[in-house]
Image (spheres, rainbow, N blue to C red):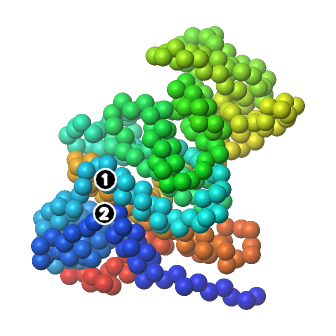
Amino acid sequence: MRRLHSTITPAVVHQRAHDVLESVLEWRPFGKLVAVADLLDLLLMMAASAASLFAVVGRFFAFSHETASRAVKANLPDCDRLVQGLLQALHEAAQLSRQDRRRHWLLAIDTHYVAYYGQRTADVIGGPKKQGTQWFFGYATAVLLHKGRRYTIALCPLAPKTKPHDIVRTLLEQIAAKGLKIQGVVLDSAFDSGETFLLLQEQGLSYTVPLRRKGNNTRNARNRLFEGRHKQVRWAEWNVKDTRRQVRTRTILWKGTLKTMLFAFQGWNETKAHNVHQEAARQKRLYQRRFGIETSYRQKNQAKATTTSRDPVYRLLLEGLGYLIRQIWVVLTAQLSRLRTSATNGWIAQLPMQRLVDWLFQELARLHPEE
């Protein structure tokens, strides 16, 4: 069988990562001590080694960690400017074609919480206790769900008490501003608010969202929807608490071997009512694809620098850099997949995310020998 050759090398990975990071902001040198190229390599090496600024500078760079810290802070803009820079870099890294921009994509939206153990600030949000703390820096992302091409295309930090529908609106607006078309959205149960359903219906988007039980009364209108036969489809109606607007959506009851779930969905063809159960089952399968966004969080963490800083902009930069490196990995594995005729995921085994991160670190260590 003819061998397939790829030109993906550690130097290529470094060059792509360097170019993508350079496009995020208008980077400036810090006096005569820290050149822009060194500053970008420092951030990339922090991400590739999942280490802090202090740990990396002391081993690989001639300037001190105080100088490096001041150089990074001197380049940090306000939060909104950094969000826009990261969004632009994410889309440039994705290298979406004209055909991609004509496609109607399936989208997954979710929130991701990074544990925080320091003194609380105005940017720290509360949540259920996890990893030994109930305080976090929160982020919301949107990922395109397509086989082998799960691009992260929207990102925003979360402020305390942000409503679920406001998160969805912000991410959808970011995507629309980049000219991408969305056909449907899959969300987890944290987004099962009436305002979220109304927003998606107003924008004409299909959706699949699991509903949670409400209140202690097992016989209220919401909880009665969890009773019935497997794959039972029916309408659910209720009024939003604050605005009293009426919400009306289809639901399907799914009784699994371990858990009973109730899904709200929209987007099936109402002119073919006899196919409603078949379409509802399809919506259930679409929801299962949402776990692709959970995978993106684990992969992002493989290329995320550590920090104890309370600065939300600095933390956002490190978070966004992890997604940028993952985006490069998605593009490179897509290139490998086009070289193969097999329908398996062999190209991912050839270049797993951790190998790409290791290559990046090796190339950076070659350019900046350890002292």
Task: Tally the numbered discs.
Answer: 2
Query: Which residue is identified by label 1?
Result: 81
Image mark for residue 25: 2
Rendered residue at 74%/75% (across/down): 341
Front residue of 28 and 211: 28
Rendered residue at 42%/56% (across/down): 87
Quick one: label 1 or label 2, which is nearer the N terminus? 2
Front residue of 55 and 111: 111
Measure how far apart labels 1 and 2 are at the Cα level. 8 Å
Residue 296 visible to the viewer: no
Crowding around mark 1 (Cα neighbors within 10 Å: few <14, some 14 to 19, many 20+) is some
Rendered residue at 23%/58% (across/down): 76
Question: What amino acid does circle 1 point to?
Answer: Arg
Q: In the image, 318: left or right of 177?
A: left
Residue 123 image-quadrant placement: top left
Image mark for residue 299: none
Q: Secondary structure at mark 1?
A: helix
Circles 1 and 2: CB atoms closer than 8 Å? yes
Question: What amino acid does circle 2 point to?
Answer: Leu
Rendered residue at 37%/74% (across/down): 18
Residue 116 image-quadrant placement: top left
Image coords of residue 328 (percent x, y): 49, 68
Name the quadrant of the C terminus: bottom left
Q: Secondary structure at mark 2?
A: loop
Image coords of residue 275 (percent x, y): 85, 35
Q: Is residue 220 above or below residue 64?
A: above
Q: In the image, 335: left or right of 52?
A: right
Q: Is residue 210 above or below residue 64?
A: above
Residue 35 image-quadrant placement: bottom left
Residue 35 visible to the viewer: yes
